[in-house]
Amino acid sequence: MSQSAMGIDITLVSTDQQMPLGFIYVDPASANQAIGSQGRKEYIYVKASENIGIYDVCVRLSGTPNYGDPSTLGTGIAQSNSGEALKRVVGVAIKAIPANSYGFIQRKGIGWVVSHAAFAVDGGLIPQAAGRADDNAGITDVSFGIALAAATGAGQVIPAYLDCEG
């Protein structure tokens, strides 16, 4: 995707703030998407409190009421850990974002995650350690998304439908 109507590219990562933190950009179904017919996608502008890798599941820091403080180092979003509350999941990184830098992460629509372990297609996704995603086996009706392909092991990049609220 190139320049959007908001004036910056959603893949831009910078050390200076370009948008208000928490700004949500909605990309309607369009021909700009890498694979056609994916429908609407939403992205949120955040500050990284630590190094965030591409396709990392990102969460709000514990007790944090915002998406980062531009004047304070180490504030913003972080990689997920095992057992994170689903309401703290903000989205999944679409580009690597270095600590104390700014960028968009995807919060809704078809995107990508990195598997923590093997899981089946159509399983609900929960946050795991190091920004990975895992299926919600044994947990009923709670997830931040749905796996659109099976993962045969750890470290696989798979398509997923994301529905993050954090």
Image (tube, grey):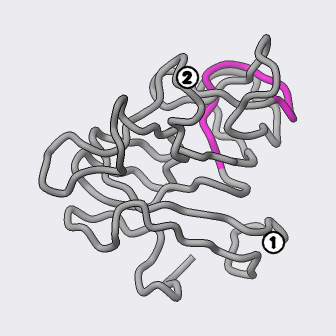
Q: Name the residue rendered at 73%, 55% in the picture.
A: 110
In the image shown, does 86 or 47 lie closer to the viewer?
86
Q: Name the residue rendered at 57%, 36% in the picture.
A: 87
Quadrant of residue 40 in the image?
Answer: bottom right
Q: Is residue 51 magenta?
A: no
Q: Is residue 146 above or below residue 5?
A: above
Residue at disc 1, secondary structure: loop
Magenta span main SS:
loop
Which comes before the other along the chain, label 2 or label 1? 1
Residues in magenta, as a range: 112-123
Q: Residues within 10 Å of mark 1 (few under 14, many from 20)?
A: few
Residue at disc 2, secondary structure: loop
Give the Cα distance between marks 2 and 1: 30 Å
* Residue 109 location (% of width, % of height): 71, 57
In the image shown, does 79 or 141 lie closer to the viewer?
141
Q: Residue furthest top?
A: 138
Q: Name the residue rendered at 21%, 62% in the picture.
A: 15
- Marks 2,1: beta carbons within 8 A: no
Residue ID for mark 2: 128
* Residue 140 location (% of width, % of height): 81, 20
Q: Amino acid at mark 1?
A: Gly
Residue ID for mark 1: 36
* Residue 22 location (% of width, % of height): 42, 60
